[in-house]
Structures are given as structure tokens and as C-alpha cells.
Amino acid sequence: MKSRLTRFAASVALGSALVVGAGSMPASAQEQGGELRLVVGSDIPSYDGHIESTFGMIHPIRPFYSLLIRVNPDNPSSPTDFVCDLCVGEVPKPTNDGKTYTFKIRKGVTFQDGQELTSADIKATFDKLAFPPDGIASNRKAYFAMIDSVEAPDPETVVFNLKFPSGTFIPSIAMPFNFIYSKNDLDERGYTWHQTNVNGTGPFHFVEHVQGSHVTGKKNPNYYHEGKPYLDGYTSLIAPKMSVRLQAIRGGQADIEFRGFPPKARDDLKEALGDQIEVQESDWNCVLIVTPNHEAKPFDDPRVRQALSLSIDRHQGSEYLSKIAIVKTVGGIGFPGHPISSSPEYLEKNIIGYSKDIEASREKAKALLKEAGHENLKFTLHNRGVDQPYKVVGTWLIDQWRRIGLDVEQWVQPSTPFYATLRTQKNFEVSLDFNCQAVVNPIADISKFLPSSGANYSYFEDAELESIYAELLATGDEGKQRELFAQFEKRVLNDLASQFITLWWYKINPYRSYVKGWKIAPSHYLNQSLENIWIDSAERKKQLGG
Amino acid sequence: MYTYIIKRLLMLLPTLIGAAILIFLLLRLVPGDVCLLKFGGEGSYADPQQILQCQQRLGLTDPIWQQFFDYMVGFFTFDLGVSMWTSQPVAYEIAIRFELSLQVALMATFVSVVIALPLGIISAAKQNSWIDYLVRTFSIAGIAMPSFWLGILIILGLLIGSQAWFGRPWMPPIHFQSFFVDPVHNMSQLIWPALATGYRYSAVATRMTRSAMLEVLREDYVRTARAKGLIEKVIINKHALKNAMLPVITIVGIEFAFLMGGLVVTEQVFNLNGLGKLFVSAVTQSDYTMTQALVMLVVAIFVLMNFLVDIMYAWLDPRIRYS
Amino acid sequence: MTTPDISIESDRLPQRKSVLQHIGSLARKQPLGFAGGLVVLAMVFMAVFAPWLAPFDPEQANFADMLVPPGSTSEMGEGFFLLGTDQFGRDLFSRIIYGARTALLVGFTAAIIGSCAGLALGVASAYFGGYFDLILQRIIDVFMAFPLIIMALAIVAIFGTGTEKVIMAITIPFIPRCARVVRSSALAVREMPYVDAARSIGYSSARIIFRHIAPNVVAPFLIMLTAFLGEAILLEASLSYLGLGVQEPTPAWGLMLQGGAEEYAESAIWVPIFPGLAITIAVFGFNLFGDAVRDALDPRLRSQ
């Protein structure tokens, strides 16, 4: 497993290094000082990482906090390279047959208000995350189902006791949402205090947040990672429109955006500013899923669903859509290129809708529809009112379906009613849905396709799928895992066509070239502490003047 | 006069209460609520138990009449509550955006008056001449052009123009700084939306100035002045303008009230953190408390402005008071 | 001496003039209104004959020709993109032509329904008076004070997006505005002796309203109707721009300004320019036309 993963990591890293050696500068060149201005496309619902799941909170707030362990900031493209943040030494190996993890905690770490961090704070944080008291929300509870108890035997030790050995424990602990809070704050100020207040141990200290406008942070002078952060501070500017974010980078009002722009935008920036713009790119652990409602006729008929999947030309879509949207890679249900995921060649031969002979596929689709008695089917595609990539992909899908004679209209709803339709109203025919995770962890990520997962909105039941997944979770053998994974994929995409994949997202980050030291990860949630970033002030002056 | 004022004030109450009921009902008709969005907004797994807890905490599971009662009590005691989305007090959220919206509204009104007055007067004085047609074309074009399109063109023009002239592209700042903190930053951000909306709103004011002037120019005393041989300039400046001002002031006042809450689209284009943008996000996030408070604020500004206009008319024209 | 006489004569007897002369004199007397009328006619023509005028299918994506500049020929062989293409390779010219259909559909439906409902409410309110009038007017107060775009946002949030919902969102705020204006005109008519006479003879309310009051409020009604047309087109564009209006792939001008149009504006400036121009010219035309109607109907503003 290790060797394959390393190879995978190397290949992803190569993909991102294609552009520029952003991190290849010698350490001595790192300059201290300066302010970073980043633009964020989403508002901040609250500062509480334990209940939020949006990058709109991660990008401005994550630098104020620390994690117990994290994705290696010097190698963020690897899905298995985790390093200690608040713990010391290596990430611990499990003992007691994989059921006990013991972390040694760093000494001399202080919160912004001066309190000293101890293991009790870490215990309190994970207790809140895994066992929230009645009435207190934790959006991460499901990820920590394996935790039996957390102990803090002394101020420098934390012990996690698991109910069963689990390969997803370490990736779950490393999730960027697991901000470490002070036990004192939780006890004295209550469990909801962190929604509207910040007190962390991260590389930056919170200065101010003007709602809807910006967040500012300044350097934490007592930060425990030696010599960091390099920046004096940063401002995170909120700009919901992508065009504004793009223009802000072009027009010198912002330096970087961490979510991602479509390729055309990158090319435009490059053309206008030449080498004043640097770009990093990576595959992205997010995908839009077509979700037919099995309770709505005729989408209860697998033939109809298969026909919908068959008529989509994913290969041509990848070629053309990747010019205008933040999607690119053709893949199955698992993150493309991950050792457990299916290869493109395998998909092409074995999974419906992945063949390169699109004419044949479309003929087959028409035949299936005819057989099902729905030749000139008319339906609405339910979509979310977000441009990139929802509406672009939706418009593309409709065009694909038109080519086999289907008449499809788009029904777009703002986020709230969109999710209400998926979850409670259930009055849609076919909808787009979204699977997007932080740490790449395909076995956990594909639980989305499981009818019992609670996040599957195609409304069906399938005992076989459930049993394959249960077996997959329980096995530790790599070969067996791959086999079960492929079996699960075939069941979802071929036999049931219960849901199907569009194109995987592709992350492109163009930014001002005086921003140095940042490395792209396969997720816009990861590697966002900003502590490695520094600014080349001479270059900045050259580009922006003054 | 006082009885008239009190009577008019009392008539504001039903409007305010009606608006309160209307927005309350409209919001409850939107499927879904803020909890659904918060706990599954990114498509992730959402524990129904947690969604329920969130709904209970925010009072969304209370019977509808109970929710309405709480809202009404808050409304009459000026307690706007806490935003369901950010958990910050609604009054605070509104306060931090009010300065920007007020400033843009003032600047845009100023631009619109500066454009409208001279154009309207010239247009009336030279009625049906080519100048009149030119002015009317210019002002109707302002109202025909979508303001967001004008905004897009302004930003594009700035980016392209600055690159051509100074060799480096520039766009206006995208976050607000108070005029009293950083006047240069402040003005370089707000002057563009003020120009775009000011031009748009000048159209109605120009038309109003023109027709008010035309009407006044036809009145007896102006004819008399003309007959007396007074030169046109004096007639217009001394006699006509003063009397034509009242309807113009009215329309400018009402436009100002609209500008305070109506810049929804322009704020998107220029990324202004004003009340309009807050409105859009509050509605799309199903933030009931915030949307209700904002609607009531805008409605209150609007009815108060109308009230002031009425009072002014009544004060100037005693017949109105007794009808 | 003779020339002015002839002109007076021909003014009195317009039937003697040819149609062309008639149009010519209209164009001289009301040049702006005439221009507006032409724009309106051109739009109607575009909307009706869209399938024959448009060189391409407006909804068919054509990935080989994405964002090509105006005046290019298609990579796929046949075809010429007069105004260039958008990010899906769809011909902008064809989308603008078909967009006129959406604009007119939304504009006319919203304006006609809005002003007719307003007419009915306004006349009824004026005729019946009393509590009915009082309560109705308070309700109208509420709707008038309610920010129009917020109303539209709420309606879209409740019922979802799409052409019919957009029409509904635009129509509802029009009704009270028209009702208010019609009511004040109708109030003036109500006190006229002939209405009293009709009432004393024992004519039914419906008959009095339709026969005697309604014709007299036609002028304000038509003024509101024409004013609403341009406004509805603008509102539709604003809602679509906010992503809450008509949805892809339906061709609609406001929608064409959203998304890709802004992101790629710097390298593909034709994408935001042409739909914006289409909206501006259309609304401009409707406004000029509306002004002309108002000048003709409102005696106070009639040229001396």
C-alpha cells in the first residue's frame, strides 16, 4: 500500500510542480514581513470549525487555530503524509491491536488570550467533536464513530481508545475543521462561544472581522513552529462573485484566491500580466453527481437511468468543459489516480458511459429508452444556483441529453431551498448533488453512494450495496479492498445506475508571483494555515508600485 | 396642522404592520430553513438530530403564531434579535453596512441632481429643439441601461484603461473603509457605483424637472413676466425655477429612500458590503430575523420619506390639510 | 399664402395622405416616439420570425467554437458567427434574436396582467369606496412600500426560478402601482354628473364601471402599461443576472450577462457587450414609445 501511495503522491506532486517551483526556493530566501490579501468567495456563517463545513470559514479562520495533526504543509498533495502540529515527534502508530493511539503534546503553546495549552484542551476538543452534549451541534460526529474514549493522563499526553481498528481514524483527526479549543473557554464560556469568538493557538492572532467585508489577522509572536509565520498579517476579503475575485487579482486589490478558477480565467490573467502571475494546479477531491430520484417515475426504471448515463460524452466533455469550468478529470466513484480507484482504461471498458465510442453509447441509450417506453422523455434537472461548476455542468448535461432526443429543462434553486428539495420535499426528478471532502480518503468518501448514508438523495434501497460496503470497511487487505471497491463501483454505476459521475473537479490557482511558499493540495480545505507563505517585497513593489 | 401630522403618522402604522406580516409569511413559505443549509450546505452528511436541535434553538419548531408573536414583541420593543446565520446581533450587522449604503445613496443623489437640474431646465427652455431631444435621449438611455451592465463596463474600462495608460491594471478597492479613516480608499471605491446609479436615477429627475418647468413656464405670472419684456434667463432663474423645485425635491427624496435599500444589483457588481448585498444573502440563507429587520428598515425609511413629503406639501398648500 | 392652407387642409383630412406620408409626418412631429415605435416593431419582428432569422440553434452547445470573436466562421464547417459565441460555443446573434422572445413574453405578460389587475382593483376601489377602499388602499400601501426587488427575490425563493415564476415575481409589484394611479383618476370621474345619473337610473355597478368609469381611466391605464413594458424587461434582466431569473439554456438577455460573460469579459468582450446593448436598445425603445403615448394622452404635457 505504502509504495503505491507514494507513487501516487509523487504523480500528483508532479502535476502541481509542472507550473513553477513555488516551494523550491532555498530557505534563506524567505523574507519576513508583509501583508497577504486573499479573496474568498463565500461568507462566514460562524467561526466554529466544529459545526461549519465551508471553505468560506476555513480560508479566513483556519490560520487562527492549530490542529492535533495535519496534512504535511511541505507535501500537501500526498493523501497519506500526515505530520504533528500540536503533538511532538511522528504521528503515533496504533498499539493494542490498532485500538489505542497515544499523542505527546507540545509544551509552551499559548492561546491568543495567554492561556497555556495542555492535553486537557485536546481531550475537551475531541470530546466535543465526538460526543457533543445534548443540544450542541458537531458536524463531525459521524467521522469519529470509532472513538470509544479520549483520556488525558498527564498534561503532555492524550490517549484515544477506539472501539475497533480503523484506517480512517488518522485522516479524520487530520481534518482541517478540528480546531483545538481551550477547555477553559468551553467550560466557562459555553459550547457555542466559539461561533462568534476566536481564541486559538495558530500562527496568526485574530484582529477583526467586519461581517460581509473582511477578516484581518496579525502574526502570533509566540507561534511554536520556529521562525513562522513569515507574514506580519493578512486580510481575507469577501467577494462572492468570481469575476470580482478575478478582477481583484488582476487589478492589484488582492494577491491570491485559494478555491480555484476556470482555465480560461487563468489564461486571461497570464495573458494580461505574464510572469507577474504564477499558477499551481491539482486534481480536486470534489465531484458533481447526477442523482435521479428513484421515487419519481420513470426514474425508478434502471434502464432510463442507464440511458441518461450512457448519453453523456465524458471524454469530449473533459476536453471542452475543462476550458470554461473548474472540472476536468474523467473518473469513477473514487478520487482519480488514487491507488484504490479505477483506472481510466478500466472505466472505459467496464463502466457504462465511459466508452470512447459515443455514437454507439447513444444508440444504446436510445434503445434502452425505447425498451422502457420513454423515447421522448421530458424532465427537469434540479440544480443549485451556483455558477461554477453547478450551472455550467448542468447546461452541459442538458445539451448532452438533447442529443438523444430528450427535452430537459433546468430548475435552479438557491442553496437553502435546493437542499430542502433534496432532503425534505423530494419533489425533483433528476438533481445534481455534490461530494466534496477535505482529506482524500476514498473508502470513507464513497459512503455518499450508500442508500443508508444519510446523505444519499436518490431514495432507494439495495441490500447488496450495503453488504459490499460493510465488507469493504471491515477488511484490511489491500487487494481485497480494491476488489470490493470495484464491485461497489460497478453496482452503483452499471447495475443500478443509482447515481452517476459527471467530471471530477480540477483546481487551478493563479496568483501574484510575489506570493511565495504556498503549495496546492487536492482540496481547497487543506494546507490553509498560511504560515509557510511569504512575500517578495521587491517584486511586490515592482508589480503594484508604491 | 398638528392634527394632520398626527393623523398621517397614525396612518403609517397599518403599513408597517402590514409589511411585517407580509415578510413574515413570505419567508415561512420558502421551503427549507437556515439549519438545513448550515449542516449540509456543502452536500455533506447531516445528522437529522442536529438539524432538529438547531431548529429548536432558533425557535423554528415553535408554532407559527408563537413565532409571529415573538417577532411582533421584538418589533415593538426595537429588539431585532440575533442573525440566524451569523449569530451576531441584527442591529450590529445592519450598523456596519449602514454607513456605506448611506454614503453611496447620498453621493448618487448628488450626482443625479447635478445631472438632472441643468439638463431638465435646458430641455424645458428649448422644448422640442434638438437640444431637448438630445437631453431626453441621454436621460432615457440612463434608465434603459441595466445598472449592473454599466457597472461591468466601468470596471472593464478601468482595468483596460489603466493598463493602457499606466502599464498596470487597476480596479477599485473591494472592501469598505470609512471616509473618516481613509478618504482616498473610500472615494476611489465608492465614486464608481455613485456615478453609475446617479446617472440612472437622474433620468426620472430630469424628466420631472423638465415637465415641472414646462408647466410653470405656462403659468400666468411667467407669461406676465415675458410680456413685461424680461429676458428669458431672468424668467427662468427668478420665477420659474423656484416654483418648479417642489416636485423635483419630492422625486429626489423618494429616490433617496429607494437608494437606501434598492442597490441590490449594483452592490453585487462592485462588491459593496451594503444593505442590498446583505438583503440578498439574508434571503438566500433563509435568515429570517435578518430579512425581517431589513425589510422593516427599508419600508420604514420609505414611508417616513413619503410622510415628510406629504407634510411639506400640506405645509405649503393649506387646502390639503382639510380635504 | 397657399402653402400653409394646404398643410392645414391635409392635417384635417389625414385619409387623403398615403401611409408613407402619414408615417413621415408622425416621425417629424414625434421623432423620439417614432424611433421607439420602430424599436418595438423590430423586436416583435425578431421574436415572431426568430426561427427564420437565427442562423443557429440558440440552445445547442458547440464545443469546437467556444468564445470565438464576432465575424468568425465555424470550425465545424457551415456557419458564420456575426456577433461571436459564448463559452458554450453558442451563437450570440441567434441567442439575442431568440432572447427577444423571452423579453417580450416576460415584458408583455407582466405589463398586461399587472396593469389590467391594477385597473380592476383601482376602479373597484374608487367605485365602491368606504371600507373596501380603505382596506384595499392600506394593502396597496404595504406593497408600494415593499422593496420591489426583495418581493421578487422572495417569490423566486418560494416558487423557484423559471420563466413563469419570473413573470409572477415581476407582475405582483406592478398591480398596486397601477391600481393607485387608476383609482385617483377614477375618483375624479366618479363624482361626474353622468355617473350619478347612471346610478339614479338604476344601472348595475358592473355596467356603470365598464361603460362609464373604465373608459375615462384608459389614459392613465395605458400610460402605466407602456411604462411597465420597459421596466419588466429590465427587472427580468436584473433577476436573471442575480441568477434568480430565467435559467440556462433558455436564451435570455440578462442571463447572457451572468456567469461567463463577466469572467471572460476581458478577453471576450463581445459576450457582455451585445446582450447588454440589446437590453438597452429594447428598453430605450419601449421608454420612448411610452413617453410618446403619455404625451399624447396626458393633456397637461401635450406640446403647445
Image (cartoon, coloured by chain):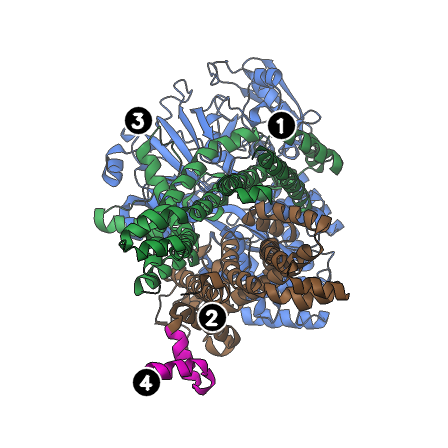
Q: Nearer the viewer, residue A97 or A329?
A: A329
Do callouts 1 and 2 point to residues on the same chain? no
Amino acid on which disc 1 is placed: Leu
Q: Name the side, left or right, on which B294 lies relative to C256.
A: right
Name the residue nearer the viewer: C260 or B286.
B286
Report the front residue among A119 and A426: A426
- Residue A423 coordinates in the image, percent (x, y): 69, 46
Mark 4 or 2, which is nearer the eye? 4
Q: In the picture provided, is A420 more to the left or to the right than C41?
A: right
Q: Secondary structure at mark 4?
A: helix
> What residue type is disc 3 on?
Gln
Mark 3 lies on residue? A32
Q: Chain of mark 4?
A: C
Provide the secondary structure element on which disc 2 rests.
helix
Q: How far separated are the C-alphas under marks 1 and 3? A: 36 Å
Part of the protein shown in magenta? C1-28
Mark 3 residue element: loop
> Mark 4 and mark 3, same subunit?
no
